[in-house]
């Protein structure tokens, strides 16, 4: 009796970068059903792509050092990048022009937009968080507010738009929650080591973070720990599927991409496609695919359901018409 075979996962490879890819972000789904992806790379040239196909749209030219973080505004009209050239830059995503360049005193590791796109928050090697107002020309590139609560390098910042809170984390082992109106810390999520990655789930319900061999899921409303999953390898990044059924993880010491069941923490799938450690992972806003960025300088797009017709994948012929 012939048995139906499980379709093999065939990732799409997005070339163009020449150094390790260290950060990826998808936009929300636009009114026409499309969405975008932005990537940060140590080659200093962040790129904007079609999120469904990985097709290149443009490269933001202007940094003079590695770019550690790249984020889009909610309406996708602007991008903010954080760089080793001691600047954070804000770009027009339609023209590629630099709209603002904010000087820092050391490497900038992370940046993000407020919900309305009028301000950005940055953090990095200075151990300082800064808020810049994009509409305040009188500030002459100076920070509107500064917070020096971190005791070590800041690796990640997220501006939680719906709740208007700023999340920051790094090597001092805790996620700090700050009120951007006063820039005072109002909550803290303690972890057991330096925090490699942190993101807010697509629906804003969970804060996901990684440290060592552990993955944490925090309630983004109450800042209580909802789930702690231990692995057998150092986890570099995690992204939760929009429907909360699964999450994808990358490792900092091997080449594998792993999919886990969210409820049980059980490993479901393991894939190899990169030729270097996986530094960053992210699910698309519709959950149909996820992207991985690696030390090998490539981005790969993987289907959540291999064999399904979607984007550039033609399907395996077994789908209903």
Image (cartoon, rainbow, N blue to C red):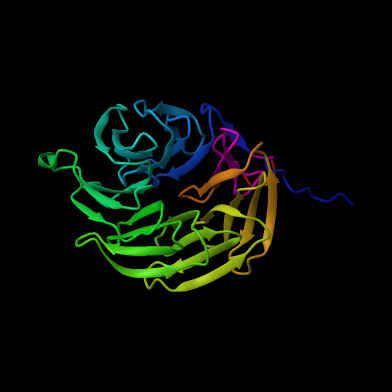
Using residue 43 as the reference point, say whether residue 28 is left or right of it: left
In the displayed orientation, state which residue is furthest to the right: 1
Q: In this view, does 125 lie to the left or right of 232?
A: left
Does residue 155 lie above or below 56 as drawn?
below
Instruction: Give how far across and how far down residue 160 sits, in percent.
Output: 33, 58
Q: Is residue 102 magenta?
A: no
Residue in front for this viewpoint, 241 or 81: 81
Which stretch did the figure color magenta? Answer: 291-316
List x then y, in percent, for residue 234. 62, 55
Q: Is residue 307 magenta?
A: yes
The residue at 54%/48% (across/down) is 288
In the image, what residue occupies the spot 33% across and 38% down? 79
Q: In which quarter of the image is residue 89?
A: top left
Where residue 240 appears, as percent x and y from the top left, is 52, 57
In which quadrant of the rendered view does residue 314 lie? Answer: top right
Residue 102 at x, y percent in the picture = 25, 38
Report whether residue 34 is seen: no
Relative to 16, residue 229 above or below: below
- Residue 284 vs residue 265, the one in the foreground: 265
Total labels: the figure holds 0
Residue 165 in view here:
yes
Residue at the (24%, 50%) spot, across then down: 131
Q: Residue furthest left?
A: 138
Instruction: Note whether 119 is above or below 77 in the view shown.
Output: below
Classify the position of the C terminus by image quarter.
top right
């Amino acid at each position: 009796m012939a048995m139906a075979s499980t379709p093999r996962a065939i990732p799409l490879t997005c070339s163009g970068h020449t150094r390790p890819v260290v950060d990826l972000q998808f936009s929300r789904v636009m009114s026409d059903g499309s969405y975008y992806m932005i990537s940060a790379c140590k080659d200093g040239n962040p790129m904007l792509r079609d999120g469904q196909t990985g097709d290149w749209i443009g490269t933001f030219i202007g940094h003079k050092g590695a770019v550690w973080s790249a984020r889009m505004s909610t309406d996708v009209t602007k991008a903010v990048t954080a760089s080793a050239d001691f600047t954070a830059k804000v770009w027009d995503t339609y023209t590629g022009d630099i709209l603002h360049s904010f000087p820092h005193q050391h490497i900038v590791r992370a940046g993000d937009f407020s919900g309305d796109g009028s301000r950005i928050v940055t953090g990095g090697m200075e151990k300082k968080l800064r808020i810049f107002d994009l509409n305040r020309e009188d500030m002459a590139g100076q920070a509107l507010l500064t917070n020096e609560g971190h005791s070590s390098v800041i690796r990640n910042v997220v501006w939680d738009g719906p709740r208007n809170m700023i999340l920051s984390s790094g090597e001092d082992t805790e996620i700090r929650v700050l009120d951007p109106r006063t820039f005072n810390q109002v909550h803290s999520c303690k972890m057991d080591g330096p925090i490699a990655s942190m993101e807010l789930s697509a629906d804003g319900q969970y804060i996901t973070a990684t440290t060592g061999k552990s993955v944490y899921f925090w309630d983004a409303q109450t800042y209580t720990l909802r789930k702690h999953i231990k692995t057998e390898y150092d986890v570099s990044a995690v992204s939760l599927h929009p429907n909360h059924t699964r999450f994808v993880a990358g490792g900092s010491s091997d080449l594998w991409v792993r999919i886990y069941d969210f409820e049980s923490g059980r490993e479901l799938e393991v894939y190899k496609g990169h030729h270097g450690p996986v530094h960053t992972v992210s699910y698309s806003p519709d959950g149909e695919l996820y992207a991985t960025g690696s030390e090998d300088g490539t981005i790969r797009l993987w289907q959540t359901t291999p064999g399904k017709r979607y984007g550039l994948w033609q399907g395996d012929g077994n789908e209903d018409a």
